Amino acid sequence: MSVVRRMLALNLPVSAGNSVTPAIQVPNGATKVTVQFTYSGLDADVVLSMHQSLDGGTFDACLNENDEPVSITLDHQFTSMTLNIIGLLTTWLRFTLQVQDATSGFIEKLNVLME
């Protein structure tokens, strides 16, 4: 399978509180996904958790081999972080944003590679 790239411009304000990204369709057969989160102006760390779906409408938490949610903490001292997922079997992904103590900043975009 060839590599598929998607870019989602979000401009998701942290000040809006906890939220959800748009769904991303995963090509048939893709089992590896790399997501680069680009952000700016965060005044505290935020967490993005991955959810998966087979129908694109009903999403459930994506769990790792230890039955823990797949998530990434975006360190407010940086402007991008990357999450690599191997062994994925789904057709749709999305991420939930948990702002925790953050009150300002934006999740600007997601760059996604799938193979």
Image (cartoon, rainbow, N blue to C red):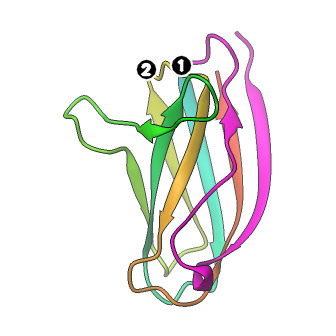
- Relative to 105, is 69 on the left or the right? left
Residue at image position (25%, 28%) is: 65
Along the line of sight, which residue is nearer the eye, 12 or 17? Answer: 17
Residue at image position (78%, 39%) is: 6
Q: CA distance from mark 2 to mark 1?
A: 5 Å
Circle 2 sits on which residue? 87
* Earlier residue among tags 2 and 1: 1
Q: Identify whether 75 is placed above or below 104.
A: above
- Dot 1 crowding, Cα within 10 Å, few <14, some 14–19, many 20+: some
Q: Which residues are magenta?
A: 1-30
Could you say which quadrant of the image residue 66 lies in? top left
- Dot 2 crowding, Cα within 10 Å, few <14, some 14–19, many 20+: few
Residue flagged by tag 2: what amino acid is it?
A: Gly
Residue flagged by tag 1: what amino acid is it?
A: Thr
**Image quarter in which the C terminus is found:** top right
What SS does tag 2 mark? Answer: loop
**Image quarter in which the N terminus is found:** top right
Per the image, is 15 magenta?
yes
Q: Which mark is residue 109?
A: none
Q: Position of residue 16 (x, y in %)?
A: 61, 81
Q: Are marks 2 and 1 in contact (CB under 8 Å)?
A: yes
Q: Position of residue 2 (x, y in %)?
A: 74, 15
Circle 1 sits on which residue? 31
Q: Identify whether 54 is placed above or below 29.
A: below
